[in-house]
Image (spheres, rainbow, N blue to C red):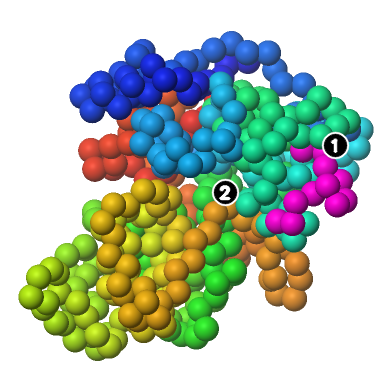
Amino acid sequence: MRALTFDVTIPGFVRARTLGRFTEAATFGPFSNLRVRDLPEPALRGEGWVRLKVLACGICGTDLANLTFSSSPMMEPFGSFPAVLGHEILAEVDEVGPGVSHVEPGQRVAVDPFISCRVRGRTGAERCASCRDGYHATCELAGEEGAGPAEPLRRGLTIGYHADLPGGWAEFIVAHESQLFPVDDALSDRAAVLVEPLSIGVHALLQAPAEDPECDVLVVGSGPIALGTIWALRAAGHRGTIVAQTKRDHEADLALMMGADECVRPGPEARQVLVETGALAYQPIVGDEVFSGGGFPVIYDCVGNQGSLEQALRFAAPRGRIVMLGCAAEIPKLDLTLLWARELELRGFVGYGQESWRGETRHTFEVTLELLKESDAPVERLVTHSFPLDQYRDALSAAANRRRSGALKVILEP
């Protein structure tokens, strides 16, 4: 099968961090560690495993950060390489093991890429506390090899960053039955490929719901996670005003389609909307102005850099909640004064898990699929670009240069 592989090496790191500042050839091109290769089709790893034909797979900001070696090294022990990248996967069931009961050949499925203790072959008390509690995205044994009876899996937290489990930038993958969620025939491929990124916002709002479903909410960011969070808030029934902070006109248009009430640009427009909440501005002798009173009870930071987190701290109401969905890493000289001075709550979320939803315990993907069926928002419009696998360099360039390309979600269709 054709597959797009990536390896982590010291020479690759040096090329990406030096030449990558001048040319994409060092990050996505011939001087990078990224290659389309012919690999054997993956075999089933046991009775409960399924082989899948990939229909579409998204390009995530995390993928770009890893390809450019700009992400924090802190998560490196929880992956294994060389790996076939791609974790936002829509696929069709190709072959099932004898122990598989809830999916069948020809069926479309969304793939939960996180690798739980169950997927690793651990049972009962061998499973970590996070997996036993239904929060496998924070599996505590991701840095360890799997257990039997099949050949042990190497370390790794997700499909797509795993040497034994190829990701969706390939023609075929394998996954455990517990990772698969059937997609209704009424849902288009363009909507269904978004189940994974949309589930991140759904997970966050279900795990840390606003105390007042009619409170004002600020969503900082204009990428797929931010727009998906707006959609998730509105689809799940949030009745308060949702203010979206976006950079470009087409992103603002989509934010309104997803359910935002108002869109503002960073800078003076965002400051004005803060003042309209009742916040009073004060100017220190040294430094930027600060605000007291007013503010937003809940802020979703879907960027995760120094500027967005500083803004969230300044714009949050006393005892407000900041929900971190952007992949924040090392942030030098970040002033956390307002975290304690305003008694703020800062919570981060990754992935998905078991949720309490309408009186039942459901996986986040199931909730997201249900909301997609109920919602009339045109979520498929978040997918702006599609490329075949052999045009991966153009795809990655479009995803990495959103201002130039106008891209939001870029997908590969192997």
**Element assignment for label 2:** helix
Q: Is the residue 9 above or below the residue 212 in the image?
A: above
Which stretch did the figure color magenta?
A: 120-130
Instruction: Determine the residue located farthest toward the left in the rendered image.
Output: 285
Graded by Cα atoms within 10 Å as few (under 14), some (14 to 19) or many (20 or more), the crowding at tag 1 reads some
Which residue bears the numbered disc 1? 48
Direction from residue 9 to residue 373 in the image, left or right: right
Residue at the spot 64% in from the left edge and 38% down from the top edge: 143
Residue at the spot 54% in from the left edge and 69% down from the top edge: 205
Which amino acid lies under the numbered mark 1 shown in the image of this protein?
A: Gly
Residue at the spot 28% in from the left edge and 60% down from the top edge: 334
Assess whether residue 245 is covered by the magenta stretch: no
Residue 328, label in figure? none
Which residue bears the numbered disc 2? 196
Which quadrant holds residue 320?
bottom left
Graded by Cα atoms within 10 Å as few (under 14), some (14 to 19) or many (20 or more), the crowding at tag 2 reads many
- Quarter of the image with the C terminus in it: top right
Label count reads 2
Which amino acid lies under the numbered mark 2 shown in the image of this protein?
A: Glu
**Element assignment for label 1:** loop
How far across and down, in percent of the image, does residue 5 sit? Answer: 52, 20
Query: Could you tell which of marks 2 and 1 lies nearer the N-terminus?
Result: 1
- Quarter of the image with the N terminus in it: top right
3D distance between C-alphas at marks 2 and 1: 22 Å
Any part of residue 265 in sight: yes
